[in-house]
Amino acid sequence: MLHYMPVAAFVLDTRHRVVIWNSACGQLTGLEAEGMLGTNQHWRGFYSEPRPCLADLLLDRSLGKLSSFYEKAGDFDADARTLHTENWCPMPDGRRLYLVIDAAAITGDNGEVVAVVETQRDRTEQRLMMQALEESEQRFAAILGSAMDAIIAIDQQQRITLFNAASERIFRCAADLAIGQPVERFIAPDCRSLFKRFLSFEDHAAKSPTWVPEGLAARRADGEEFAIEVTFSPLDTGGQRLYTMILRDVNDRRRAEQQLDRLQLEKGYLQEVIDYEHNFGEIVSGSREMRAVFEQARMVARTDTPVLLLGETGTGKELLARGIHELSDRSKAILVKVNCAALPGELIESELFGHEKGAFTGATQQRKGRFELANGGSLLLDELGELPLAAQAKLLRVLQEQEFERVGGSETLKVDVRVIAATNRNLAGDVAQGRFRADLYYRLNVFPIDVPPLRERQTDIPLLARFFLAKYAQKFGKHIGHIEPAALGQLLRYPWPGNVRELQNVIERAVILSQGAALDVSALINLHADPPAKNVRLGTLEDVERDHILHVLEETGWTISGAKGAAAILGMNPNTLRSRMQKLGITRQG
């Protein structure tokens, strides 16, 4: 496992000699294992002059303090068996990489240290993106502070969570006296019922910004009422829904929405890139099936050929798409994702191509679409099979001509975008039934990659289970070191209709429920019982999918969202599950 895992790692014996130097370590440092095994020259891979590595310090504390060699590291006690640092490291070949370094002691039966393993993870790009995000947030804060309009955020308890400098001036109230107070305090009494209609947290259909140019009045802290125009914008962030209000005194109004919208989009996409935990080089797999997939991905990555990723939900298509982007010549630009199933049909064209001000109700300003945001980079069209036919026609033109017009606009825009599409549907069958355009299918099907389901690569199940166990044990602060053979047998026998995502969810729940040092999956037996070996009703793939979704819905009392809902159990996004239910004709009787 050490030899073939995608993380750079080496192992030292107690005399500081290299006994393992895996292939990923060779790729990171440029030094092959043949020249390193049996030597104490491992420092040459990471530093330009002799100095102890983290593994050396763990073997021999007399070599120095951790803080004298690494900036972001505290000291460690004499009983420490693991060490962790992360720092900018000047590599011998002149590169400057941000490495996350971990070292752990390997002990014998009597507890003595017999070797030390050290791993290095290259987080240079994520660190640079974090710096870019911080700069974006600073610019965002500067815009909020300099805006001439009052910008106020309201939570679901109708209390103020954001009150910018212009709000202080317009309402004549300091921010610290306004934040946490009911927004009703700053609304004219005659308009309170009307305000509540626009601030409707219960109405999930109200997804678009609403501009109210007249008819509303606000009240300053000293009691003076004044006429306003206001834009109400729903915002989902961190699992919580908020509303932002941009208020303008009719007699003293300024426009700041356009610049705010651009910075919010920039911040959102930078955050999405940073939050993504794994890239292509760190997909956990040791199976022949996935190695074949990786080889295809590497071959096509440096071209601009469209890629079509085919596979069931939860197999890792989005992660593979991100890896293709990172290995391409476009890796310095952004990868923009569009979930075609999560967007209402009437908004898909606006999301993809943008819209002009006044193009439709609620379009109070010009907005760039995902193709413009991805210019120079890559665009991932996830769940492509859910795209309406009208949007398919426009998408075909962009793929052929690399040009389009915004909704409601006449200007032709040119872009340079590499498209990666992903779907769990049988597009060829959809073409035959008229649900998907044949010309678009053949345009995207230039380089299809089939991602096998987890049940067809069972050798990956133990690797993934242990990977997720280590991840969530650390996250929840639990000391769970292994999986019992009986539990591992259960995991291997289960067919995993939700694939890797379902396995990840099961391991996370098992870590939460386990009390001892071994992973306990007994609490999940009823939920994830082995399928019956006999009397299985034969049918199409859609029949099997419909039956499984119905079974899970009945087990959860038809609860879709939430930690114990059907979507979490199936390893799906709640919106994706609702879309599949609609397409499969699944409704709750009575």
Image (tube, grey):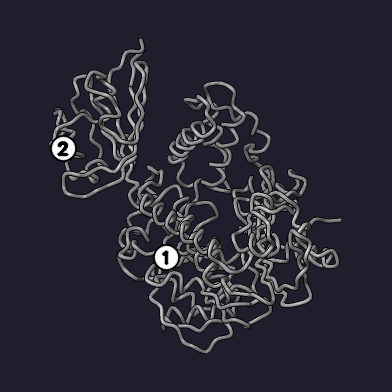
Residue positioned 62% across, 73% down in the render: 347
Residue 506 % position (x, y)? 58, 38
Could you tell whether 251 is left or right of 302 in the image? right
Q: Please say if 31 is above or below 394.
A: above
Residue mark closest to the camera, 2 vs 1: 2
Q: Secondary structure at mark 2?
A: helix
The C terminus sits in image quarter: bottom right
Which sits in the foreground, 84 or 525?
84
Q: Please say if 517 is above or below 327.
A: above
Which sits in the foreground, 434 or 135?
135
Q: Amino acid at mark 1?
A: Pro
Which sits in the foreground, 59 or 494?
59
Figure disc tally:
2
Disc 2 target residue: 44
Q: Does any portion of residue 215 appear in the rendered image?
A: yes
Q: Amino acid at mark 2?
A: Arg
- Callout 2 environment at 10 Å: few (<14), some (14 to 19), or many (20+)? some
Of the numbered discs 2 and 1, the one sitting upstream in the chain is: 2
Which sits in the foreground, 441 or 117?
117
Disc 1 target residue: 448
Q: How much space separates mark 2 and mark 1, taking CA atoms? A: 42 Å
Residue positioned 70% across, 74% down in the render: 229
Answer with the quarter of the image where residue 193 lies.
Answer: bottom right
Residue positioned 63% across, 57% down in the render: 163
Q: Which mark is residue 173?
A: none
Answer with the quarter of the image where residue 90 lies.
Answer: top left
Could you tell whether 433 is left or right of 271 in the image? right
